[in-house]
Each structure stands twice: as structure tokens, then as C-alpha cells.
Image (cartoon, rainbow, N blue to C red):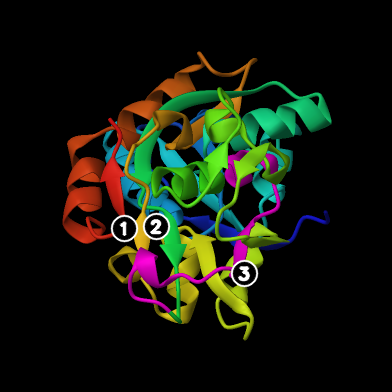
Amino acid sequence: MKKIYIGALSLVAVLTLAACGSSNGETKSSSSADKTDKVIKVASQAPPMTDVVKVAAEVAKEDGWEVELVQVNDNVAYNDMVSSKEADASFAQHKPFMEKYNSEKGTDLVAIQPIYDAKVGFYSKDYKTVEEIPAGTKVAIPNDVSNEGRALAILEEQGLIKLKDGVGVNGTVKDVVENPKNFEWLQVDLLNLAEAYSEPNVSLVYNYPTYIAKIGLKPADALFLEQTIDQRFSIQLVAREDNKDSEKIQALKKAMTSDKVRSFLENDHSDTLVPAF
């Protein structure tokens, strides 16, 4: 998929170095190099992920780091940027999605730190209770394997389907062994699931808070939410194998697990997520 960039936003003012003495070319060159070494470029996609990066940038600034956000608008570009070393890290995905990307692209992205667990579940414009859901309902679920399995596991939690023993969150529609309501599956790209909500023949739609918010809904509006939190699905700070232990990534991890970020998550987004650190 073609990478589309919304733009690079510098979130932290560059540290102003006091001119102590010489202003010759050698000193300027050294200062420029030091500044570059202190820039951490982070690729992300949408709020609240981008907002978390901004708050972390304020914390990192106290330790002399500049965090630069590059905001993209699809679910591939942020991984492409980290893999190609255009960015140092990303903050936009859970571990199974990252692992799927690695498997498909032959890359070596690494999950560094879970930051929060999104409240995910199913939404319905037609029904208010699970009991009302009729036979033959069309159910919209993600078309990528990692999110498809999670959606099906939530339906199993509600007793609406039964999956093949042992598949857990790794199941696909082919692993549905009992479908008493004869659900019809509509597999949709994660970014387009919110639009499926308005389709006349779709009565049950899986989604994340970030995406369902586009049509004015939030987890409190869901017909039912995921009951068992699995931190494999926490939204993660992700880097590469070759830079995971670098000073930059460790500084970024420290900032993103700070008290200031935790307070932001708890005070501003408690209706949509739970801190994972």
C-alpha cells in the first residue's frame, strides 16, 4: 500500500544551546550533530495514539530529547517507516498485528512496551440486547487475521458461536464449528469497519474506539465489549531488533511509561482504554 503522510509535526521545541564563547564553524557543526542525535522520530496514526506521543514528548524534553511525530493515515506506513529506518519507532498497533507484518515482509520489528488496552467490542444500530439478535444476522469483522481472531473470540465469549478447540484468538471464520444463529460474515478492512455500521443489511459490527469514534460512537454505546483482556493486544511501542536497546528507544520507553502519560490515559481516555503499564 502506498505510504501517505499527513505530515511531520515537531512536538517539542529544539533545545536552545547557550553560546558559550566560540561561534566558529566547528562549534556549530558539533552542536548540529548533537541536536540530531537527540531527535527520536515516532510514526503513529490517529488519536489517542498520536496524543500519547505528544504527552511523552513533553516528558522526554525534560531529559534533553526531541520527539518528532510523523502521522500517517493507514495501517502499513508506520511499519514501513520503522523497517526502512525512516523512523526510530512506531506507536499504532498490537503485537499480533506487528508479527503478521514481520511474517509477510520478512522484517524484524520488536514490541518494546505495552502502553494501553483499547476497549473493543461489537456495535449494533438495530438491537439493544444480545438476546434480540436474530438468525441470519450479517456480522462485520476485520479482514486481517490478527483482528479477525480477536473479534471471533469475543463472539464466543458471548455464547454466540463456538470455535474449534484450542484456536482462541487465533481463529478464523473457518474455525467456527457452531453458528446457531447462522451469522453471515462480512470481512472488512479495519479502517472501513465504521462505515459498515451504516450498511442496511449489517446489524453487528466489531470495532476499536479510535475508529468507531468517526461516527460518533464510543465503547459505552457497544452492544457488548471484550470481557477478558489479553495484553498481546495492548497497543505497543514498537522498534527494530537493531535499535531496541538503543539510548533513544530506552528514553522513549521511559517517557511513554511516565506518570504523566498514565495520568493522561486515566483522566482523558478512561472511557475508551485502560493503561497497560
Tag 1 and tag 3, C-beta contact below 8 Å? no
Which quarter of the figure is the N terminus placed in?
Answer: bottom right
Which numbered disc, 1 or 3, marks the residue that appears first in the sequence?
3
Whether residue 108 is situated above or below residue 269 in the rendered picture: above
The percent position of residue 141, horizontal first and vertical second, equals 61, 57
> Which residue is disc 3 drawn over?
136
Q: In the image, residue 4 lies at what x, y percent?
A: 74, 61
User: What is the C-alpha distance between the residues marked 2 and 1?
Assistant: 9 Å
Whether residue 137 is in magenta: the answer is yes
**Mark 1 residue type:** Thr
The amino acid beneath tag 3 is: Gly
Where does the magenta region start and end?
A: 127-149
- The residue that disc 2 covers is 48
Q: Label 3, label 2: how many angstroms apart (C-alpha)?
A: 35 Å
Structural crowding at the residue carrying mark 2, measured as other residues with C-alpha within 10 Å and reported as few (<14), some (14–19) or many (≥20): some
| Residue type marked 2 | Pro
The span from disc 1 to disc 3 (Cα, nearest Å) is 30 Å
- Looking at marks 2 and 1 on the same chain, the residue that comes earlier in the sequence is marked by 2
Instruction: Decide if residue 256 is on the left or right side of residue 4.
Output: left
Q: Is residue 2 visible?
A: yes
Local secondary structure at mark 3: loop
> Depth check: 106 or 152 in front?
152
In terms of image quadrants, where is residue 228? Answer: top left
Which one is nearer the viewer's eye here, 99 or 33? 99
Residue 21 location (% of width, % of height)? 38, 32
Comparing marks 1 and 3, which lies closer to the viewer? 3
Q: How many marks?
A: 3
Front residue of this view, candidates 138 and 136: 136
Say which residue label 1 marks.
272
Labels 2 and 1 touching (C-beta < 8 A): yes
Q: Earlier in the sequence, mark 3 or mark 2?
A: 2
Mark closer to the observer (3, 2): 3
